[in-house]
Image (spheres, rainbow, N blue to C red):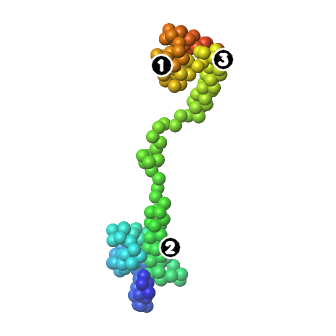
């Protein structure tokens, strides 16, 4: 029977009902103080037995009693006793708290949710892709020896001297062919714009 409340005797139940009705109908602060004095320690004990920490239980008790003050006019003694009505509010607040803890609110500024690099807008990405395609088309139209040297210099990032050694060409020839290749690429890229 852990977690169950002891039944309230008839006289106490009637008194609590009368106090709750006075709060609802007349906004009677004295009646509310009496309800608070009666329910606050019992609600806290109930919440602690449900596994809540003391601080969280006290917060829920405060919220429940504020709800009792605000919603006392909706209490109907024909449907429930005052204790049942108040403890139902506490139970619902506890469930709401558990749901919030399981599904925390997302902070859009949380560094874990913000990409490290800025995402390029779709239109810019599309333009870059088109430029890239034009460049590759223009490279395919170059003479083979120029395209080969261009690929080594700019895509493999090799120095001109290394290219000259690997292709067994004079350094001046490598530089001349690269200049010619770049001039043709500028022309081809400018023509397609």
Element at badge 3?
A: loop
Q: CA distance from mark 3 to mark 1?
A: 25 Å
Label 3, residues with CA under 10 Å away: few <14, some 14-19, many ≥20 = some
- Of the pair 34 and 87, the residue shown nearer to us: 87
Rendered residue at 56%/11% (across/down): 177
Q: Residue 160 in the image: x percent, y percent? A: 48, 16
For label 1, the SS is helix
Q: Position of residue 182 (x, y in %)?
A: 56, 14
In the rendered image, which quarter contains the C terminus?
A: top right
Residue closest to the eye, 86 or 107? 107
Mark 1 highlights which residue? Answer: 162
Mark 2 to mark 3 CA distance (whole Å): 83 Å
Q: Which residue is more in the foreground, 136 or 68?
A: 136
- Tag 2 or tag 1, which sits nearer the N-term? 2
Residue receiving disc 2: 74
- Which residue is farthest front? 168
Residue that label 3 marks: 141
Q: Nearer the viewer, mark 2 or mark 3?
A: 3
Q: CA distance from mark 1 to mark 2?
A: 88 Å
The mark lying in front, picked from 1 and 2, is 1
On screen, 122 above or below 142?
below
Q: Is residue 66 visible?
A: no
In this rendering, the answer to whether 61 lies above or below 150 is below
Query: What percent of the width, then of the height, locates residue 166?
Result: 51, 19
Which of pointers 3 and 1 indicates the residue nearer the eye? 1
Kindly identify the residue that appears in the image at 48 percent across and 60 percent down. Answer: 103
Which residue is pictured at 40% across the width and 80% down the height?
19
Quarter that holds the N terminus: bottom left
Taking the image as shown, residue 14 lies to the left or right of residue 139, namely left
| Precedes in sequence: disc 2 or disc 3 | 2
């Amino acid at each position: 029977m852990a977690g169950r409340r002891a039944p309230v005797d008839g006289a106490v139940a009637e008194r609590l009902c009368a106090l709750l009705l006075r709060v609802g109908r007349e906004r009677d602060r004295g009646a509310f103080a009496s309800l608070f004095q009666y329910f606050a320690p019992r609600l806290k004990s109930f919440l602690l037995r449900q596994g809540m920490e003391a601080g969280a239980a006290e917060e829920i008790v405060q919220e429940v009693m504020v709800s009792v003050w605000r919603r006392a006019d909706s209490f109907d003694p024909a449907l429930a006793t005052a204790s049942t009505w108040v403890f139902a509010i506490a139970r619902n607040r506890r469930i709401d708290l558990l749901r919030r803890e399981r599904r925390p609110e997302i902070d859009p500024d949380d560094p874990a949710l913000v990409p490290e690099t800025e995402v390029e807008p779709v239109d810019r990405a599309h333009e870059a892709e088109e430029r890239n395609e034009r460049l590759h088309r223009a490279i395919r139209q170059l003479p083979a020896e120029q395209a080969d040297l261009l690929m080594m210099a700019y895509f493999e990032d090799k120095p001109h001297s290394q290219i000259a050694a690997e292709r067994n060409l004079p350094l001046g020839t490598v530089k001349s062919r690269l200049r010619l290749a770049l001039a043709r690429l500028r022309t081809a890229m400018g023509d397609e714009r």
